[in-house]
Image (cartoon, grey):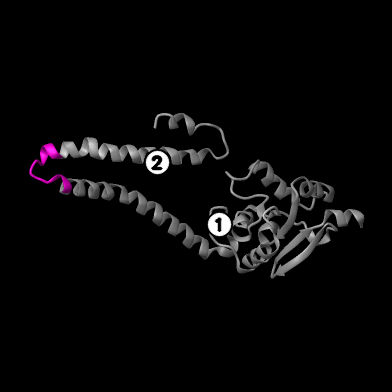
């Protein structure tokens, strides 16, 4: 319990997840405290009540005490999801609970094409769905599970910026062995680059305003 006061300040990119260990320890200590401190105290004040009944009452009271926090968090999430569903076409950084049908179909296509070693480059909003829905690897996804998250976030923004040269884009694709690129309204918000103009990107799936491109650096070089 005391060591986590130090562990939670270790400057790692998954720092916040160290709180989970603290929460588990607190739960164990609370259970020990219930049986070794609270119940003996109650038995002294309620000597006529059987221990089994006392345990039941004390446990029920403990649950009632912690329920408000759980209800608050649950209601908070439902409000977030409601806001996201009402604003699905223009979702913000806080509302990432849904994707459009065209985006989902693109994910289904990738699921039928990618291997577990394939890397898919997309915006953060779409990239975080890639591992679960396609089985492939995401260039940019969950902040705590993406190595050099902020660096890769900047690379994605640069990739879809028309001011960046194709040579720089090829360098990113080659260095990180990217095999597919998704271009949707999410990526269009990052920049006005048109991937269809690149010799190293071949469109392999289109649904509405969502297009999946396959990376072909070798073919572009020979061309």
Which residue sits at x=57%, y=35%?
A: 12
Residue 112 badge:
none
Of marks 1 and 2, which one's residue comes earlier in the chain? 2
Residue 37 in which image quadrant:
top left
Left or right position of 32 against 117: left
Circle 2 residues within 10 Å: few <14, some 14–19, many ≥20: few
Residue 191 locus on image (x, y percent): 73, 54
Left or right position of 146 against 79: right
Residue 174 falls inside the magenta stretch: no
Q: Secondary structure at mark 2?
A: helix
Q: Residue furthest right?
A: 223
Residue 24 badge:
2
Residue 139 locus on image (x, y percent): 68, 50
Tally of numbered discs: 2
**Which residue does the numbered mark 1 point to in the structure image?**
96
- The answer to whether residue 153 of the structure is visible from this angle is yes
Residue 98 in which image quadrant:
bottom right
Residue 14 locus on image (x, y percent): 55, 40
Q: Which residues are magenta?
A: 43-52
Left or right position of 167 against 42: right
Residue 44 falls inside the magenta stretch: yes
The vertical placement of 167 against 204, above or below, is above
From the viewer's perspective, is the residue at label 1 or at label 2 nearer?
2
Which residue sits at x=54%, y=63%?
A: 87
Which residue sits at x=53%, y=59%?
A: 97
The vertical placement of 18 against 182, above or below, is above
Separation (CA) of disc 1 from disc 2: 28 Å
Q: Please tell me which residue lies in front, 127 or 40.
A: 40
Q: Secondary structure at mark 1?
A: loop
- The answer to whether residue 160 of the structure is visible from this angle is no
């Amino acid at each position: 319990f005391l060591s986590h006061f130090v562990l939670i300040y270790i400057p790692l990119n998954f720092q916040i997840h160290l709180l989970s260990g603290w929460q588990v320890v607190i739960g164990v200590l609370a259970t020990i405290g219930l049986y070794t401190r609270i119940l003996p105290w109650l038995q002294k004040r309620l000597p006529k009540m059987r221990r089994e009944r006392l345990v039941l009452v004390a446990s029920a009271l403990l649950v009632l005490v912690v329920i408000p926090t759980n209800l608050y968090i649950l209601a908070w999430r439902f409000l977030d999801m409601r806001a996201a569903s009402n604003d699905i076409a223009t979702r913000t950084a806080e509302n990432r609970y849904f994707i459009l049908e065209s985006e989902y179909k693109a994910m289904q296509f990738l699921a039928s094409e990618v291997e577990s070693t394939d890397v898919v480059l997309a915006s953060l909003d779409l990239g975080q769905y890639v591992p679960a829905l396609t089985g492939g690897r995401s260039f940019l996804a969950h902040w705590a599970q993406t190595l050099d998250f902020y660096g890769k976030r900047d690379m994605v923004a640069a990739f879809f910026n028309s001011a960046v040269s194709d040579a720089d884009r090829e360098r990113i694709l080659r260095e990180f062995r990217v095999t597919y690129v998704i271009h949707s309204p999410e990526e269009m918000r990052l920049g006005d680059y048109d991937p269809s103009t690149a010799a190293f990107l071949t469109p392999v799936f289109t649904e509405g305003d969502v297009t999946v491109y396959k990376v072909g650096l070798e073919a572009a070089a020979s061309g």
